[in-house]
Image (cartoon, rainbow, N blue to C red):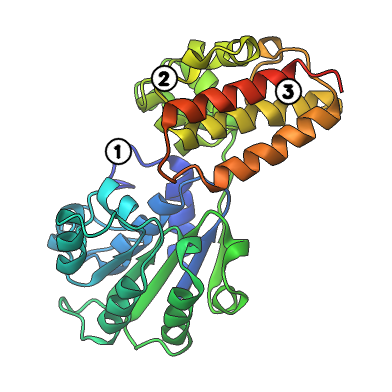
Amino acid sequence: MSDSPSPSLAPWIAAQRTSLLAQRGHAWLLQGPSGLGQYALGMELVRAWLCDAPTEKGACGHCSSCHAIDVRTHADLCVLMPEVQMMALGWPLSEKAQADIDDKKRKPSREIRVEAMRDAVEFAQRTSARGRGKAVLVYPAEQMNPITANALLKTLEEPPGDVRFVLASEAAHQLLPTIRSRCLGHAMVWPAEADMLQWLAGQGIEPAAAAAYLRSAGGRPDDALALARSGRSPQAWAALPQAIARGDVAALGDWAPAQAIDALQKLCHDLLAVCVGAAPRYFAPGDLPKPPPLGALTRWSRALAQAARTADHPFNTGLMLEALVAQARNTLHSRH
């Protein structure tokens, strides 16, 4: 039997899955920075819990339960995510939520809605449809607001006998302490660089490009893979700092505001690092312009953090990118 139902499953995720399946507990909290595979590991756990023929290495990948998860129709699996992520990952919304979005009554939610949590609590009370228990996957768990989190807390405190939970988080410090205390915690493994490069090569990415994508993602393998599949070239990333220093808005031409702000925050981070004698993380040293004074970078960092909080609000994207690039250029040429 294969070690994994998915040929692209990273070996470090497979190893963590095997380790966690050997332990008992009704609720896991998978925590760590983004891009380390929290969602993939959470899915591997629920697949194994619900599988008709599981092994110590996880789900069989061939039974009717595994197939039902693959096609997103498993009666004993409840997935709680922001609607934007549900849709991106192919999970169906509730009929009412889908109807509201189709009728343009509202946009897909970017946080986990209270209505979805109430449905999950009701799901947890029901009898298992397939007789192998039930599972609830919450990702990213920090997208619960306080009302939603409190609705989950009661079920975590007094779980029905056959339901298990996986909370996968990229910012576990934002969760209620009471929720964290009800779960077994697992810190996501940060893989060795050689293992990440080998895995990225296995996804069809050329070695030199894999190294460049991994650097631009800050050493986070899932984020590196997403960058590689986005169509952005490593050469464009390497050229970005000098283009920004010239005030070239075209360098961010096809980027969404949140993506542009993220890229500028990475540039600001690396220049701050160089300023204090540390190595840059996201760009090669030779790609960076000369850093401006520390005070100017600190002000820019604060301004970018403020801009990030409103990046998803509707405004003129072109004007916003122009303003961001002008702000960056002024900072990079600042003398104080």
Residue visible at 20% across and 54% down in the picture = 104
Which secondary structure, mark 2?
loop
Residue visible at 22% across and 86% down in the picture = 126
Which secondary structure, mark 3?
helix
Residue annotated with mark 3: 331
Pointer 2: residues within 10 angstroms few (<14), some, or many (20+)? Answer: few
* Left or right for 77, reference 139: left
Residue situated in front as seen by the camera: 304 or 153: 304
The tag earlier along the polypeptide, 2 or 1, is: 1
Q: Position of residue 155 (x, y in %)?
A: 41, 85
Q: Quadrant of the C terminus?
A: top right
* Left or right for 176, reference 27: right
Amino acid type of the residue tagged 2 in the rendering:
Arg
Q: Position of residue 94 (x, y in %)?
A: 19, 66
Residue annotated with mark 1: 7
What is the CA distance from the residue labelled 2 to the residue labelled 1? 25 Å
Residue visible at 56% across and 62% down in the picture = 186
Q: Position of residue 67 (x, y in %)?
A: 15, 55
Q: Is residue 250 visible?
A: yes
Which secondary structure, mark 1?
loop
